Amino acid sequence: MRAQEITFLKLIQGDKQFQVPLYQRTYSWGREQLQRLWEDVGELVEQHLAGETAAPHFLGSVVLAPGQLQAGGVQRWLVVDGQQRLTTLMLAFAALRDHLKEMGDTRGVDRVHRQILVNEFHEGADHYRLLPTQADREAFTACVQSRADAGGSDNIGAAYRFFRGVLAEVHEAGDERWPAAVETVLKDLLSIVEITAEPGDNVYRIFESINNTGVGLSQSDLLRNYVFMLLPKRGERIYQELWLPMQQSLGPKNLELLVWLDLVVRGHYKTKQSEIYREQQKRLQPLAGDEDALQREIEQLAERAGRFLRIVDPAREQCPALRTALERLASWGGQTHYPLALHLLDLVAAGRTTPEDAAEALGYVESYLVRRLICQTPTSNLNRIFMEAPKELETDRPAAEAVRRFLSGRRRRWPSDEELREAIRSKPFYWSGRPPQRAFILRRLEESYDASEPVDFAKAALTVEHILPQRPAPQWFALLAEETEENQTPQELHDLLVHTLGNLTLTGDNAKLSNHPFERKQQIFDSSALRMNLEIASAQRWGKAEILARADRLAERAIKLWPGPIGGVKPAGEDSPGWAELRAALVAMPSGTWTTYGDVAELIGSHPVAVGAYLGSNPTVFGAYRVLTAEGRISPSFRWAEGEDRPAPQDLLTSEGVRFDSWGRARRSQRLNAAELATLLGKDVAQQVSYDPLPEGEDPAAAERFRSQLKQHWPEAYPGVLAALDFWRRQGGYVTYGRYEETSCFPMLDTGTSRSPQVLWPFGIYPVSGSIEVVFQYLKSRTPFDDTEQRRELLNRLNKIDGIDLPEAKLELRPSFPVTVFAQHSERICEVLDWFVGAAALELARRA
């Protein structure tokens, strides 16, 4: 084998084709890996545009084995390892080419397509520079060919859509130089080690050895070995007295994190965690031969370890104010604040500030994070902001003032009081951040009532409750009908209000509250120990007016709890975070789907009219034609940008796979609602506990409620559903039920091992609403259905049954079909269940 470091452009130059063997897994990179790559590309682009000399970014290795060479044909290479990187870069170039096409850069389009994506003078399979596994091939070639169905629901389509989205965002920012700089970086500034096997080498054995190499040394392991190599005389004593106690108190992961934070607070804020060893080695190399200086370095690191432990475990902090501030940030979760918190503790230790001043500074950090979450400000640059802080803080003023001034910077987006008030009234708070963060905000708001007997939150098992329910009974819609606007349905008003902060509270009685009428909820809230719930119980009714009034009251409390930036007003000319989220949502939509102005409004906390006005004045927004009226029709006011020669919107949607009836209405099953759009954006779209499987097993009372509800609402489907559940039990499965008023039902199957337990369920049955929800979103993270092809097979088998029409674009979501299908086709559904159990059993046998 031979190895050489090479750029991507040089790797693929010539008449070559890289073939991914059948034994390789399908393309699996997700948003996290794509985002990390794009951040690295973005840094290189900025350096390139600034005229700085940018060192190539090492992307990893690609192991190739020679394939067959036909006379006059392409040189084939088998991709033994590195197919994820190669596929990702090809998809990035496909997205870049299509972005250049929209910009009107025909030369750029031609250059990228011919130079990177295809072998220009070859046809058929030889035409493509990369040929993925057969399962990925159709989706990949759709992107290379720039077909209408490019950007489907699988990982290939998601990666293509990701790059289309980030390029569109850069275009919206107005820097026309970026696309050319991105092309340069992708071609020439991403370094790859090409490892080439010789003819006759056992390719599969090479693949096996590369992917079964055991656990390598961590960055902190490498640093430890290097440091103690430089300490031949004192090494053993220093290890026993300093390094080993530090290592034992922190543990391996936190030790590595500390070594990285040590660099960041010293000002090396661009250092990635994968580069810790190299950067620390570079810093310490001049001290080689000076054991006194090296000992001082380790002593300083050990002291910093003690301070870092107080961030991870705030109970160790002695100052009450500082301990409270650290506890709140620990409850918030995540590591974003670590660099700034460690820097502040360093200042306290050095006597350059007081613990109380550091506590006030951390209070501003909490405010900054909370306000951004409530206002749904994009988090893409959040880590970078906090990594820059230690170096950028002004040193000639108190730490708290310096932190507030730093976070108030224009490009750091600390929402003003005005923005906070509006967000609390309109944004779907229930989809913001993570569940612990939502609960943290509600808890802090409750504590602001200063109750004489406050709730012990550590012991109370509280969850977030929707006062106006997510699935309301008819009485609720009758109440909402009194407050709807012209041409607005009660359902549409419900959707705009239900997830806002004014409609949410904390309770330990979630199961009791369910979707009962407000009068019943009042009785339960009236006995609550929480002051905010007693306030809700005092209301006479619960509709739009009450929700917005409560939102305004909570906003005033929030403004006092979490002070805003210096200046306190939104900078003029800044784009609303809602419009950025709208653009991201339209990019995230798989081909073959559509949505409505109301769905987008619900997602971003706006109004359908405002969404229509924005898209009308910005017709170049990617995917704007996918937003239709509530009936699924093209809006009469939709227009392409002037001079843009594109097909009619309905024709374009049809070419992507959206089906229309003879009245021009798009098929309802292909519509993405607001919750589905939020899921595609990576939001934590939590469901009520009743709509997830419960571990209690087949509770007789719950089973009887389910059967009673099903028989009452869908008597024609009742025998078929029960027959299918009996069949499921005979196949080795069992059934669980929900605890809420609508008693949902889940056919469950244990498919894990004693070491790795796992449960599968194909769908949930809702006996009142009459829907069967196919849980592709959950199956995606469970073998064998983490393979897209297995989920697609489940979808195709179900779609062969009359009355079921699940769109392929929802292979990562939870589409549904009517329970009435069981009335005529229970046996056909049992056949699908039999296949489902067999697929799970085959995977279990493979792992045994």
Image (cartoon, grey):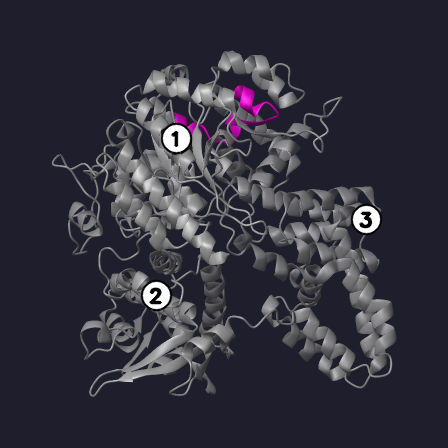
Q: Say few, some or many: other residues with alpha carbon within 10 Å of mark 2 (under 14 / 14 to 19 / 20 or more).
A: many
Q: Is residue 508 magenta?
A: yes
Q: Is residue 128 visible?
A: yes
Q: CA distance from mark 1 to mark 2?
A: 46 Å
Q: What percent of the width, then of the height, locates residue 470? A: 44, 27
Q: CA distance from mark 3 to mark 2?
A: 49 Å
Foreground residue among 544 and 131? 131
Residue visible at 40% across and 21% down? 707
Amino acid type shown at disc 1: Asp
677 left or right of 804 in image: right
Amino acid type shown at disc 3: Arg
Q: Say few, some or many: other residues with alpha carbon within 10 Å of mark 3 (under 14 / 14 to 19 / 20 or more).
A: few
Q: Residue furthest front?
A: 730
223 left or right of 653 in image: right
Residue visible at 41% across and 53% down? 842
Residue visible at 59% across and 50% down? 408
The correct choice, above or below, for 27 with respect to 20 in the image is above
- Residue placed under numbered mark 3 in the picture: 316
Q: What percent of the width, then of the height, locates residue 312? A: 72, 51
Marks 3,2: beta carbons within 8 A: no
Q: Residue furthest left?
A: 662
Q: What percent of the width, then of the height, locates residue 21? A: 35, 71
845 left or right of 724 in image: right
- Residue placed under numbered mark 2 in the picture: 91
- The circle on residue 726 is 1
Badge 2 marks a residue whose secondary structure is: helix
The correct choice, above or below, for 428 with respect to 844 in the image is above
Q: Which residues are magenta?
A: 494-513
Amino acid type shown at disc 2: Leu
Badge 3 marks a residue whose secondary structure is: helix
Q: Is residue 557 magenta?
A: no
